Image: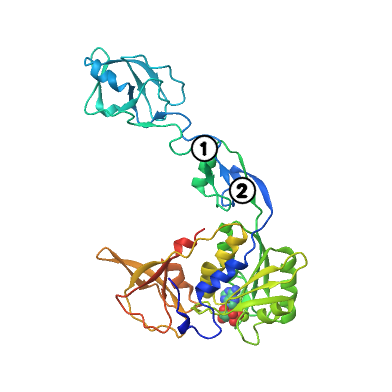
């Protein structure tokens, strides 16, 4: 689902999809890797594929608490089967003698000779201790076969996989204690703006608390980057030049906020053009139009720079739909395409000209169907609605939003990791 058709784009602005594609095409995955203990690998990215050392399951085993037996013995022993073995999980069973059965528990190995497990709910022991079965018994029932999930050598996880809880569990189930992961991406963070002060400091007239800094740190943290926080930089070309030079020398990616529009106090673009190259500036989206992307020249390899808008919601949204995918690609991940689902608008509204709008919305249920409602004020500095939103309703530019029509909904949950 494209954001806007080219025909409706404001000249000079890139379509969101195209901006994303250009970013991903420019991303160079870090080559360095390191060995990491499994216990410390949460959120890290696999540098190489992992193959199975062990088949899973490693042996035929019981899927239920019950009795293991030979199916044919049920017909030939109508007066019941003596229980001659007890097999809890973790023990090695003896072969099952003909005409007998074994008490067995979930996960315990099937004794050689047995060909089905009857759940205990369907078994009855008579006064002589012989076991009788109610209902039908099927060959192979309730037996998990050796290698039924995968065999030795099977591809388990690809390079670029982020190690989340199930992936760590899969590695642990193979007895793996350490993994080769990509090096942590060093991301330099720069806030620009003479008006910005840190929370904890009294505000002088005209000043504003720096909220982008803590937000971007929080957004980068689950990406497992090493954050190099260069603080707040004054709105002068020389201060920015110095900060970007420092960032270039100590980071793999530079992210700055503010100062990226076309005003006299906006120095990011001219200084970037001086120290490197601006690839594009301006995306046909609201919020987020001033987003810029370029490279700072450095001997031994240029360093990419993401210029996020200063307005907090614009900063948030451009990080989510553009910056995050770029950073992930630099970590060796293959970013997922933006997840978009059709959802009906529960309101009507005018759309901005020449730009698609990502409205912060909450999903309500009407007659079992999700319907989007505005989460609050939609200004690009209004963080309140962003805090409440379930996602963004993406509406093409130049078209009024009509209640009852379906638009692309981008759940914010997709940006969690
Ligand atoms: P700019 O892109 O620098 O023109 O900033 C646009 C708006 O965002 C201005 O109102 C700034 O005061 C505000 N802004 C810029 N940076 C930040 C920040 N780090 N935290 C909060 N607001 C900011
Ligand atoms: Mg500024």
Could you say where residue 12 lies in the image, as x and y percent from the top left?
Answer: 56, 84
* 118 to the left or right of 35: left
Instruction: Please report whichever mark, 1 or 2, sits nearer to the chain's N-terminal start.
Output: 2
Farthest-out residue, right: 299
Dot label at residue 219: none
Q: Residue at x 58, y 51 (%)?
A: 159
Instruction: Examine the image and state in which quarter residue 5 appears.
Output: bottom left
Residue 237 against residue 163 in the figure, above or below: below
Can I make out residue 374 in this image? yes
Q: Is mark 2 within 8 Å of ligand 1?
A: no
Query: For the residue labelled by badge 1, is the local secondary structure a helix, a strand or a loop?
Result: helix
Can I make out residue 207 in this image? no
Residue 103 against residue 298 in the figure, above or below: above
The residue where tag 2 is placed is 48
The residue where tag 1 is placed is 173
Q: Residue at x 44, y 64 (%)?
A: 339
The residue nearer to you, when weighing 18 against 289, is: 18
Q: Quadrant of ligand 1?
A: bottom right
Query: For the residue labelled by badge 2, is the local secondary structure a helix, a strand or a loop?
Result: loop
Could you say where residue 48 lies in the image, as x and y percent from the top left?
Answer: 61, 48
């Amino acid at each position: 689902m494209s954001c806007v058709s080219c025909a409706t784009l404001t000249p000079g602005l890139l379509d969101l999809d195209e901006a994303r594609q250009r970013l991903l095409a420019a991303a160079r995955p870090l080559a360095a890797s390191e060995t990491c203990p499994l216990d410390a690998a949460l959120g890290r990215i696999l540098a190489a594929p992992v193959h199975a050392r062990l088949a899973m399951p490693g042996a035929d085993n019981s899927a239920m608490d019950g009795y293991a037996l030979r199916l044919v013995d049920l017909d030939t022993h109508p007066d019941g089967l003596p229980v001659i073995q007890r097999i809890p999980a973790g023990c090695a069973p003896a072969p099952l003698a003909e005409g007998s059965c074994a008490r067995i528990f979930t996960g315990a190995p099937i004794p050689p000779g047995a060909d089905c497990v009857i759940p205990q709910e369907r078994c009855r022991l008579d006064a002589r201790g012989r076991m009788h079965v109610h209902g039908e018994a099927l060959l192979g029932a309730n037996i998990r076969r050796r290698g039924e999930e995968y065999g030795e050598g099977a591809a388990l996880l690809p390079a670029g996989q982020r190690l989340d809880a199930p992936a760590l569990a899969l590695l642990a189930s193979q007895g793996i204690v350490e993994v080769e992961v990509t090096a942590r991406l060093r991301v330099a963070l720069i806030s620009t703006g003479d008006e910005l002060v840190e929370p904890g400091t009294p505000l002088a007239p005209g000043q504003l608390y720096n909220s982008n800094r803590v937000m971007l740190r929080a957004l980068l943290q689950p990406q497992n980057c090493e954050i190099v926080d260069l603080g707040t930089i004054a709105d002068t070309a020389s201060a920015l030049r110095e900060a970007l030079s420092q960032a270039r020398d100590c980071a793999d990616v530079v992210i700055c906020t503010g100062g990226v529009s076309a005003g006299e106090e906006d120095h990011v673009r001219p200084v970037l053009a001086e120290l490197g190259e601006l690839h594009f500036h301006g995306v046909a989206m609201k919020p987020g139009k001033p987003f810029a992307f370029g490279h700072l020249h450095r001997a031994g390899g240029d360093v990419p720079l993401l210029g996020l808008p200063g307005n907090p919601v614009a900063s948030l949204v451009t990080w989510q739909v553009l910056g995050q995918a770029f950073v992930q690609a630099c970590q060796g991940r293959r970013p997922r395409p933006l997840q978009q689902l059709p959802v009906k608008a529960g309101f009507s509204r005018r759309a901005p000209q020449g730009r698609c709008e990502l409205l912060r919305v909450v999903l309500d249920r009407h007659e079992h169907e999700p319907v989007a409602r505005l989460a609050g004020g939609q200004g690009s500095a209004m963080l309140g609605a962003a805090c409440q939103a379930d996602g963004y309703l993406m509406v093409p530019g130049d078209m009024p939003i009509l209640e009852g029509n379906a638009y692309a909904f981008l759940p914010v949950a997709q940006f969690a990791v």
